Image: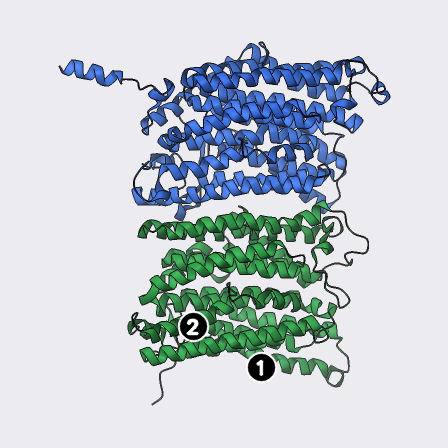
Amino acid sequence: MIPQIDVAAVAPMIPVALGVLCLPLLEIALLRTPVLLGQRVSAARRGTYLATASVLFLSVSLLLTLNAFSQPPRVFNPENPMVRMDGVALFLMSIVLIGAMLSVLASSKYLEHIHSNWGEFYTLVLSSVTGMMFLVAASDLIMLFLALELMSIPVYALAGFRRASLRSNESAVKYFLIGSFASGILLYGSSLLYGATGSLELDEIATSFDPEDALDLVGAGLVLIGLAFKISSVPFHQWAPDTYEGAPTTISGFMATAVKVAAFGALLRVVTVAFAPVSESVYGVLWVLAALSMTVGNVMALIQRNLKRMLAYSSISHAGYLLIGVIAGGADGTQAVLVYLLAYTFMTVGAFTVISVLARDGEEHDRLDDFAGLSQTRPGLAAVMSICMFSLLGMPGTAGFIGKFLVFSAAVQSGLATGSSSLIWLVVIAVLNSAISLGYYLRVPATMYFHPPRESAQPTGNASFFEGLVLAGCAAAVLLLGLLPQDALPGVSSLLQMADVNVLQLASDAAASFAP
Amino acid sequence: MGDLFDTLLSEHLLSAITFLPLATVLALALCEGLFRLPESVWKYTALVSSLVGLGLTVVLWQRFDSASSGMQLVEFAAWIPAYGIHYSLGIDGIALLLVALTSFLLPVVLLASWTDIHERVRSYLFFMLALQTGMLGAFLSLNLFLFYVFWELMLIPMYFIIGIWGGPRRIYAGLKFFIYTMVGSLLMLVGIVVLAWLHQAQFGTPSFEYYGTNGGTGILDLSIPNAGGAWWQRQGFLFGVFALAFAIKVPMFPFHTWLPDAHVEAPTPGSAVLAGVLLKLGTFGFVRYALPLFPEAALDWAPWIVGLAVVGIVYGALVAWVQTDLKKLVAYSSVSHMGFIVLGLFALNSQGVSGAVLQMVNHGVSTGALFILVGMIYERRHVRDLAAFGGLAKVMPVFATFFAISTLSSIGLPGLNGFIGEFLILLGAFSSLPWATVIATSGVILSAVYMLWAMRSVFFGALSNPANQVLIDLGLREKVVAVALVIPMFWIGVHPSTFTNPMDRAVTELLETMSRRGADLATWQNGGTRVEPLVAATGTETSR
């Protein structure tokens, strides 16, 4: 019997997957242009073409994803719904696609500057994105595992993309070892859950979950640990600083945003759907992870002198803030997580792109000292970096504040509804942590604006067109989302003829469609 | 165009005043991006814009009706309706005075710093005017979310002003200023969010509107228990987080340690605006939010706050006395004087509160003037050490005169503004808090001691230092600045009712709101001895 399969359900994934197949061919074609056209295409040009092609594939996917918002949620196979394209999945897919597009655009020139301009880069990014899109929609533990691996394995390679650099190799090996370890734990947990509940589907796991049975609980715990590794939550975070520091900068940005967004999507779905019967204890565990991630992430970031490392710790602390939204739960908590992830993507990609623009002649300029006096040598870069830093620390008027505000608001509301004070404590811990984070976020604008430029510090030369696009886009998105979160997407909505696109509403509808 | 202008003036006057500075610098920055503007264009445009702002404030003052109650010239626009977050502005008598203070100080400060700031002038003007928008917005917001946005946004320009144009320890001072203020305000944010969701629990929708606009309910209509319920929904906690944010901003002892650093390191205009306006936001926060929203908790906490205020008065004065750096001396005198304002507020009677509000303006003018005058001498000599001066009155008689007037205004000489404010505060405080007032009065004496001491060592004595003998007296621009600063000192001192009339109504309403929301003000105003409620007694008699 052939099952009824709704291929259109997974339409948004298809262009990206197609891109994975086409990009190597395109690269070969570009390499063979002397034969085909009688003219050589320079390596730089080749990178630009490949980046443009990748962005085309990604944007077709994005259009299909946005288009799917207005349609009722679809499942790939009704009898065995491995993929559920609900609002949350679509929203997270959009974020992943936007993050990937920004990272790809920022990469083409950067790869050349670090002498690593090879075409595989784009294929790897796109295959990872395919994995992410399935990951956020996976409603089945097998699908979840496959998607997680499809996402992770290309990123292992990408982390080590600077073949000549020892740090990059170290980064890749560390990420690979710990990542596969985490995948193993997740897989083991899944198998225990399957043994205990007799199902791999998240819905069915929830119905036959026995909160008294040790096997169920251990399985749930192991799955949680596996995902906690992927979102780099303390105490499963040790890989992040080394990996982010060693990986090519745009890939660090990609890992800090798209990979984290996808992993959070999986966590959100598993926790809300499959572990609903044990939500009390799961939230208890997440409470501890959130408090630890925020505190350790922020305190450790204080002592970093390397910006990529600092941003790695900052991303650990942001995982903590995000977990508050997961714990708050309900439509408001989910909405808060979605908006926070969107905001976080723009500000983090923006910050990493600024660092990547400074790379020249095979060298990164990613230490804090390299930013001294940047406001005088590169005022535009300094302005974008400042906007991103103020947004990361949650200054009103920026996207980061809206994200934090929604998370806190969801937590307070949930605390008010349940009458428990533990969430309020978590919010208090979070705001005190935000105060700690001032110490390192402010250091960046302070270095750029208050210190004189160093002799022979920053390389001169302008950002490329693509880089400028990414920087301007991130800064504009951060400010727009911060000042007018209701109408942050007026242009997009008219473009797609969608009736009512405001990010908050979209996120809140998405959250409502998330039916446990 | 003309219609647009009319609408702007008639219906959006508050928005116009608030956003004129920001719009000016954004326009300048845009032009700068298109074709490089000379610095002088920036300078003159900024000055003219701040003068237009002052003109609009005069229009506002005339438009303001002292007799009517509640918020006036209210503006409302939906912002994030799902959360009850709106753009709503309005003004009452107290905010009017502080808006006027801000609009007055800005052009004066810009003129005073005309030659003082000569590096990166464009950025300086950008941050200065952005700061003005932040301050005005915080005074005028009627939505707690909007208030928080403006409250926090003020930090960024001030941080850059201290950090770029400040003294040797500017980076440390800027960071300290930022962190202190932010710790308090982040906790306040938790309180604000709790209030919004309490509004949902009590009225069905979340709202950050302070006084329900358009006939709706607002935060001020919430009934917040002072005992019972979860700890974080009680007045005690909520008042605590609001009061902490405001106490840091004021700054009250022991949260004052950021202030000497920030003041000493900040450039002259930064110090003048910081002391002149930013500190007032702390006391304004008490008046507008902490007191009326949580009156019972305010009374519970009041003895502690009064105690800290008195400690601040005496401690600030004593520390100011031993300073050898003129700017640090003025900075510590601020700690002492701001203590007086808090004392007056927590007298919680009409004289005390009126005196406190008036003293906010007075302190803004006098301390702003002192910082600007200290800046003028620093611009000439590049030292601020008291020992480096002496006998300046001989070479700079005009400067000495203006400095003397500002000093006398600061220590409360009758006929000048400081006297009126201090007198009202002491009058009000003595009936509610006799003992605290007795101790606080020593602060008045001490302030005379250290200010006159400083005056003597700077202006009188032998003109022995050769570097001082060649000092040039004030130029025309500086004279204009000094005269502008001295006018309100005399005005408030001689004819205070110009300034007290508009706020009388708001002060009465504050006390009425507190009583209506359950605070036993009568007992507090009587120095803690319970007053038998007269109305109830009459009621029983008639029923008999």
Chain B: colour as depicted: blue
Which residue is pictured at 50% across the width and 33% down the height?
B247
> How would you rate the neighbour count of disc 2 (Cα within 10 Å): few for under 14, some for 14-19, many for 20 or more?
many
Chain A: colour as depicted: green
The residue nearer to you, when weighing A192 against B26, is: A192
Q: Quadrant of the C terminus of chain B?
A: top left
A500 relative position to A122: left or right: left
User: Residue B274: x and y, percent?
Assistant: 61, 31
Q: Are marks 1 and 2 in contact (CB under 8 Å)?
A: no
Identify the secondary structure beneath mark 2.
helix
B428 relative position to B205: left or right: right
What is the chain letter for disc 1? A
- The amino acid type, in three-letter code, at marker 2 is Val
Identify the secondary structure beneath mark 1.
helix
- Residue at numbered disc 1: A21
- Residue at numbered disc 2: A223
Which quadrant of the view contains residue A99? bottom right
Which residue is pictured at 53% across the width and 70% down the height?
A60
Q: Is residue A265 visible?
A: yes
Q: Earlier in the sequence, mark 1 or mark 2?
A: 1
Up-down relation of residue B34 to residue B503 (above or below) = below
A353 relative position to A44: left or right: left
User: Residue B197: x and y, percent?
Assistant: 36, 45
Disc number at residue B208? none
Which residue is pictured at 68% across the width and 16% down the height?
B453
What is the chain letter for disc 2? A
